[in-house]
Protein backbone atom coordinates (compact mmCIF):
# COMPACT_ATOMS: atom_id res chain seq x y z
CA UNK A 1 0.00 0.00 0.00
CA UNK A 2 1.12 3.59 -0.57
CA UNK A 3 2.63 5.32 2.43
CA UNK A 4 3.05 8.63 4.22
CA UNK A 5 6.07 9.33 6.43
CA UNK A 6 5.76 11.32 9.66
CA UNK A 7 8.96 12.61 11.27
CA UNK A 8 8.85 12.87 15.03
CA UNK A 9 11.02 13.86 17.97
CA UNK A 10 8.10 13.25 20.39
CA UNK A 11 7.54 16.99 20.95
CA UNK A 12 4.09 18.64 20.97
CA UNK A 13 4.96 20.19 17.62
CA UNK A 14 5.70 16.78 16.13
CA UNK A 15 2.54 15.26 17.62
CA UNK A 16 0.47 18.04 16.08
CA UNK A 17 2.10 17.35 12.69
CA UNK A 18 1.30 13.65 13.17
CA UNK A 19 -2.37 14.51 13.74
CA UNK A 20 -2.46 16.43 10.46
CA UNK A 21 -0.60 13.61 8.71
CA UNK A 22 -3.18 11.12 9.96
CA UNK A 23 -6.01 13.22 8.49
CA UNK A 24 -4.21 13.20 5.14
CA UNK A 25 -3.52 9.46 5.36
CA UNK A 26 -7.20 8.72 5.97
CA UNK A 27 -8.34 10.93 3.09
CA UNK A 28 -5.82 9.50 0.64
CA UNK A 29 -5.87 5.89 1.94
CA UNK A 30 -2.17 5.88 2.89
CA UNK A 31 -0.44 3.83 5.56
CA UNK A 32 1.73 5.76 8.06
CA UNK A 33 5.43 5.30 8.77
CA UNK A 34 6.38 7.02 12.03
CA UNK A 35 10.12 7.79 11.91
CA UNK A 36 12.53 8.87 14.65
CA UNK A 37 16.27 9.35 14.25
CA UNK A 38 18.22 9.02 17.50
CA UNK A 39 21.53 10.04 15.94
CA UNK A 40 23.56 11.51 18.81
CA UNK A 41 25.29 14.86 18.31
CA UNK A 42 29.09 14.65 18.08
CA UNK A 43 29.32 17.13 20.96
CA UNK A 44 28.05 14.48 23.36
CA UNK A 45 30.84 12.09 22.46
CA UNK A 46 33.38 14.91 22.63
CA UNK A 47 32.25 15.57 26.19
CA UNK A 48 33.27 12.07 27.24
CA UNK A 49 36.69 11.89 28.82
CA UNK A 50 38.58 11.11 31.97
CA UNK A 51 36.27 10.87 34.92
CA UNK A 52 33.14 10.67 32.76
CA UNK A 53 30.94 7.61 32.36
CA UNK A 54 30.90 6.26 28.77
CA UNK A 55 27.86 7.29 26.79
CA UNK A 56 25.43 4.38 26.38
CA UNK A 57 23.71 4.56 22.98
CA UNK A 58 21.44 1.67 23.92
CA UNK A 59 19.61 3.98 26.36
CA UNK A 60 18.76 6.45 23.58
CA UNK A 61 17.84 3.62 21.22
CA UNK A 62 15.44 2.20 23.81
CA UNK A 63 13.94 5.65 24.46
CA UNK A 64 13.40 6.07 20.71
CA UNK A 65 11.66 2.70 20.39
CA UNK A 66 9.47 3.34 23.45
CA UNK A 67 8.59 6.83 22.25
CA UNK A 68 7.56 5.48 18.85
CA UNK A 69 5.43 2.74 20.41
CA UNK A 70 3.65 5.30 22.58
CA UNK A 71 3.00 7.68 19.68
CA UNK A 72 1.87 4.83 17.41
CA UNK A 73 -0.64 3.68 20.05
CA UNK A 74 -1.94 7.26 20.32
CA UNK A 75 -2.46 7.48 16.55
CA UNK A 76 -4.16 4.08 16.51
CA UNK A 77 -6.57 5.29 19.21
CA UNK A 78 -7.39 8.30 17.04
CA UNK A 79 -8.04 5.99 14.07
CA UNK A 80 -10.28 3.72 16.18
CA UNK A 81 -12.31 6.75 17.31
CA UNK A 82 -13.24 7.65 13.73
CA UNK A 83 -16.76 6.87 12.43
CA UNK A 84 -17.58 3.49 10.93
CA UNK A 85 -16.47 3.22 7.33
CA UNK A 86 -13.25 5.18 7.87
CA UNK A 87 -10.42 3.53 5.88
CA UNK A 88 -8.20 1.25 7.94
CA UNK A 89 -4.74 2.82 8.32
CA UNK A 90 -1.71 0.84 9.46
CA UNK A 91 0.92 2.62 11.57
CA UNK A 92 4.51 1.37 11.29
CA UNK A 93 7.42 2.64 13.42
CA UNK A 94 11.04 3.13 12.33
CA UNK A 95 13.74 3.88 14.91
CA UNK A 96 17.12 4.52 13.33
CA UNK A 97 20.64 5.70 14.01
CA UNK A 98 20.79 7.13 10.49
CA UNK A 99 20.60 10.90 10.14
CA UNK A 100 17.18 12.20 9.17
CA UNK A 101 18.17 13.12 5.63
CA UNK A 102 19.78 9.67 5.16
CA UNK A 103 16.74 7.71 6.30
CA UNK A 104 14.30 9.92 4.37
CA UNK A 105 16.41 9.72 1.23
CA UNK A 106 16.44 5.93 1.56
CA UNK A 107 12.74 5.54 2.35
CA UNK A 108 11.47 7.96 -0.30
CA UNK A 109 13.35 6.19 -3.08
CA UNK A 110 10.42 3.81 -3.00
CA UNK A 111 7.56 5.02 -5.18
CA UNK A 112 5.21 3.81 -2.45
CA UNK A 113 6.03 6.89 -0.33
CA UNK A 114 3.86 9.79 -1.48
CA UNK A 115 4.46 12.43 1.21
CA UNK A 116 6.68 13.34 4.17
CA UNK A 117 5.16 15.39 7.02
CA UNK A 118 7.13 17.29 9.67
CA UNK A 119 6.41 19.91 12.32
CA UNK A 120 8.34 23.16 12.53
CA UNK A 121 9.91 24.45 15.73
CA UNK A 122 9.51 28.21 15.58
CA UNK A 123 12.09 29.11 18.23
CA UNK A 124 15.25 27.97 16.41
CA UNK A 125 17.30 29.07 13.40
CA UNK A 126 18.41 27.64 11.05
CA UNK A 127 15.08 25.92 10.66
CA UNK A 128 14.76 22.71 12.57
CA UNK A 129 11.82 20.49 11.68
CA UNK A 130 11.17 18.01 14.46
CA UNK A 131 14.85 17.91 15.33
CA UNK A 132 16.63 17.85 11.94
CA UNK A 133 18.23 20.25 9.52
CA UNK A 134 15.89 21.23 6.70
CA UNK A 135 18.57 21.80 4.05
CA UNK A 136 19.89 18.25 4.29
CA UNK A 137 16.35 16.90 4.36
CA UNK A 138 15.27 18.79 1.23
CA UNK A 139 18.38 17.81 -0.71
CA UNK A 140 17.66 14.11 -0.22
CA UNK A 141 13.91 14.28 -0.74
CA UNK A 142 12.24 12.24 -3.49
CA UNK A 143 8.63 13.20 -2.75
CA UNK A 144 6.80 16.30 -1.46
CA UNK A 145 7.36 17.53 2.11
CA UNK A 146 4.56 19.14 4.12
CA UNK A 147 5.75 21.47 6.87
CA UNK A 148 3.11 21.91 9.57
CA UNK A 149 3.34 24.91 11.96
CA UNK A 150 2.28 24.16 15.52
CA UNK A 151 -0.66 26.59 15.26
CA UNK A 152 -2.22 24.62 12.37
CA UNK A 153 -4.58 22.18 14.08
CA UNK A 154 -6.96 20.93 11.39
CA UNK A 155 -6.53 20.09 7.73
CA UNK A 156 -8.77 22.66 6.03
CA UNK A 157 -7.56 24.05 2.70
CA UNK A 158 -9.79 26.26 0.56
CA UNK A 159 -7.12 28.36 -1.19
CA UNK A 160 -3.66 27.03 -2.08
CA UNK A 161 -0.96 29.36 -3.42
CA UNK A 162 1.81 28.00 -5.64
CA UNK A 163 4.74 30.46 -5.62
CA UNK A 164 6.46 29.98 -8.96
CA UNK A 165 9.92 30.89 -10.15
CA UNK A 166 8.79 30.32 -13.76
CA UNK A 167 10.85 27.14 -13.74
CA UNK A 168 10.59 24.42 -16.36
CA UNK A 169 9.14 21.88 -13.94
CA UNK A 170 6.62 24.26 -12.38
CA UNK A 171 3.91 23.68 -14.99
CA UNK A 172 3.98 19.93 -14.40
CA UNK A 173 3.53 20.43 -10.65
CA UNK A 174 0.79 23.02 -11.21
CA UNK A 175 -0.99 20.48 -13.40
CA UNK A 176 -0.88 17.94 -10.56
CA UNK A 177 -2.06 20.53 -8.04
CA UNK A 178 -4.93 21.50 -10.33
CA UNK A 179 -6.03 17.85 -10.51
CA UNK A 180 -5.92 17.71 -6.70
CA UNK A 181 -7.91 20.95 -6.47
CA UNK A 182 -10.67 19.38 -8.53
CA UNK A 183 -10.87 16.22 -6.44
CA UNK A 184 -10.43 17.92 -3.05
CA UNK A 185 -12.37 21.11 -3.76
CA UNK A 186 -9.86 23.92 -3.20
CA UNK A 187 -8.92 26.91 -5.35
CA UNK A 188 -5.41 27.10 -6.82
CA UNK A 189 -3.59 30.44 -7.09
CA UNK A 190 -0.28 30.78 -8.98
CA UNK A 191 1.93 33.78 -8.35
CA UNK A 192 5.39 35.05 -9.26
CA UNK A 193 7.37 37.79 -7.54
CA UNK A 194 9.49 40.15 -9.67
CA UNK A 195 11.92 42.61 -8.15
CA UNK A 196 11.61 46.22 -9.40
CA UNK A 197 14.13 47.00 -12.15
CA UNK A 198 15.27 50.26 -13.73
CA UNK A 199 16.28 48.65 -17.03
CA UNK A 200 13.77 46.41 -18.78
CA UNK A 201 14.78 42.77 -19.16
CA UNK A 202 12.94 41.72 -22.31
CA UNK A 203 14.13 38.13 -22.09
CA UNK A 204 12.64 37.83 -18.62
CA UNK A 205 9.42 39.49 -19.76
CA UNK A 206 9.10 37.08 -22.68
CA UNK A 207 9.73 34.15 -20.34
CA UNK A 208 6.96 35.31 -17.99
CA UNK A 209 4.54 35.90 -20.88
CA UNK A 210 5.18 32.43 -22.28
CA UNK A 211 4.76 30.87 -18.83
CA UNK A 212 1.46 32.72 -18.38
CA UNK A 213 0.29 31.53 -21.80
CA UNK A 214 1.17 27.90 -21.01
CA UNK A 215 -0.45 28.23 -17.61
CA UNK A 216 -3.71 29.43 -19.16
CA UNK A 217 -4.00 26.09 -20.98
CA UNK A 218 -4.30 24.20 -17.67
CA UNK A 219 -7.84 23.64 -16.53
CA UNK A 220 -9.42 25.26 -19.56
CA UNK A 221 -8.12 28.70 -18.70
CA UNK A 222 -9.24 28.61 -15.10
CA UNK A 223 -5.78 29.45 -13.73
CA UNK A 224 -3.99 32.74 -14.31
CA UNK A 225 -0.57 34.03 -13.25
CA UNK A 226 -0.62 36.63 -10.49
CA UNK A 227 2.44 38.78 -11.15
CA UNK A 228 3.59 40.45 -7.93
CA UNK A 229 6.30 43.06 -7.63
CA UNK A 230 8.42 43.87 -4.63
CA UNK A 231 11.99 44.04 -3.40
CA UNK A 232 11.09 41.86 -0.40
CA UNK A 233 9.92 38.39 -1.41
CA UNK A 234 8.23 37.57 1.89
CA UNK A 235 6.36 40.85 2.21
CA UNK A 236 5.05 40.59 -1.35
CA UNK A 237 3.77 37.07 -0.78
CA UNK A 238 2.27 37.89 2.61
CA UNK A 239 0.32 40.78 1.12
CA UNK A 240 -1.10 38.43 -1.50
CA UNK A 241 -1.87 35.82 1.17
CA UNK A 242 -3.76 38.36 3.27
CA UNK A 243 -5.89 39.55 0.35
CA UNK A 244 -6.77 36.11 -1.06
CA UNK A 245 -7.23 34.15 2.18
CA UNK A 246 -4.57 31.55 1.37
CA UNK A 247 -4.62 28.40 3.55
CA UNK A 248 -1.49 26.64 2.25
CA UNK A 249 1.68 27.58 0.37
CA UNK A 250 3.36 25.34 -2.23
CA UNK A 251 6.86 25.83 -3.65
CA UNK A 252 9.59 23.95 -5.52
CA UNK A 253 13.01 23.59 -3.88
CA UNK A 254 16.12 23.69 -6.07
CA UNK A 255 19.06 26.11 -6.43
CA UNK A 256 17.93 29.61 -7.43
CA UNK A 257 14.25 28.69 -7.17
CA UNK A 258 11.77 30.62 -5.05
CA UNK A 259 11.87 27.74 -2.57
CA UNK A 260 15.65 27.97 -2.34
CA UNK A 261 15.38 31.70 -1.61
CA UNK A 262 12.89 31.01 1.19
CA UNK A 263 15.49 29.04 3.08
CA UNK A 264 18.70 30.83 2.12
CA UNK A 265 17.93 34.56 2.07
CA UNK A 266 18.16 36.53 5.29
CA UNK A 267 14.47 37.39 5.47
CA UNK A 268 13.41 33.79 4.88
CA UNK A 269 13.07 33.00 8.60
CA UNK A 270 10.18 35.45 8.83
CA UNK A 271 8.15 33.46 6.34
CA UNK A 272 8.37 30.27 8.39
CA UNK A 273 8.59 31.61 11.94
CA UNK A 274 5.75 34.13 11.53
CA UNK A 275 3.70 32.12 9.06
CA UNK A 276 0.78 30.17 10.41
CA UNK A 277 0.19 28.33 7.16
CA UNK A 278 1.40 24.86 6.21
CA UNK A 279 3.95 24.75 3.38
CA UNK A 280 4.09 22.03 0.74
CA UNK A 281 7.59 21.70 -0.76
CA UNK A 282 8.24 19.81 -3.98
CA UNK A 283 11.75 18.56 -4.80
CA UNK A 284 13.10 19.58 -8.21
CA UNK A 285 13.55 15.95 -9.25
CA UNK A 286 9.93 14.96 -8.66
Image: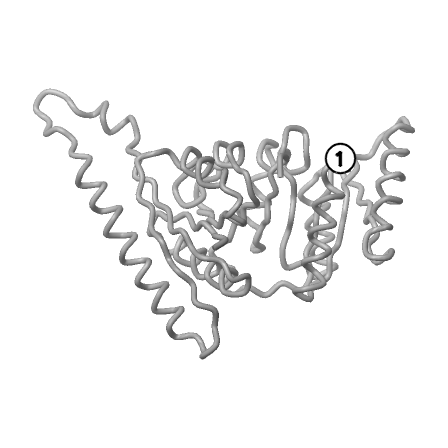
Residue 126 in view here: no
Residue underneath mark 1: 168
What percent of the width, then of the height, locates residue 93?
Answer: 33, 51
Residue 71 versus residue 142: which sits nearer the camera? Answer: 142
Seen as rendered, the residue at the extreme front is 1
Q: Is residue 196 above or below residue 189?
A: above
Q: Residue at x 68, y 33 (%)?
A: 257
Where residue 78 appears, x then y in whole percent? 38, 69
Regarding residue 148, the answer to whether it shows in the image is yes
- The C terminus sits in image quarter: top right
Q: In the image, what residue occupies the spot 41% across and 45% down?
A: 130
In the image: residue 84, left or right of residue 246: left
Residue occupying image coordinates x 12% and y 28%: 54
Q: Residue at x 47, y 35 (%)?
A: 105
Q: Is residue 47 left or right of residue 162?
A: left
Please identify the quarter of the rendering in which residue 186 is found: bottom right
Secondary element at tag 1: loop
Badge count: 1
Amino acid sequence: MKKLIVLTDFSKTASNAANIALEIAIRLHLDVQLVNSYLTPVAIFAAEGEGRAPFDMSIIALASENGLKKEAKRLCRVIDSKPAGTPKIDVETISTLESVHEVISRLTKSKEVKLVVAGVHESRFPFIFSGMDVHQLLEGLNCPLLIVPKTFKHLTVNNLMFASNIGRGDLEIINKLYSCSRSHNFHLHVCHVSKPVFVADFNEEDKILKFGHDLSKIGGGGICLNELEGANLVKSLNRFIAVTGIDMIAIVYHPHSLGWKFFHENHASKLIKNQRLPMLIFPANL
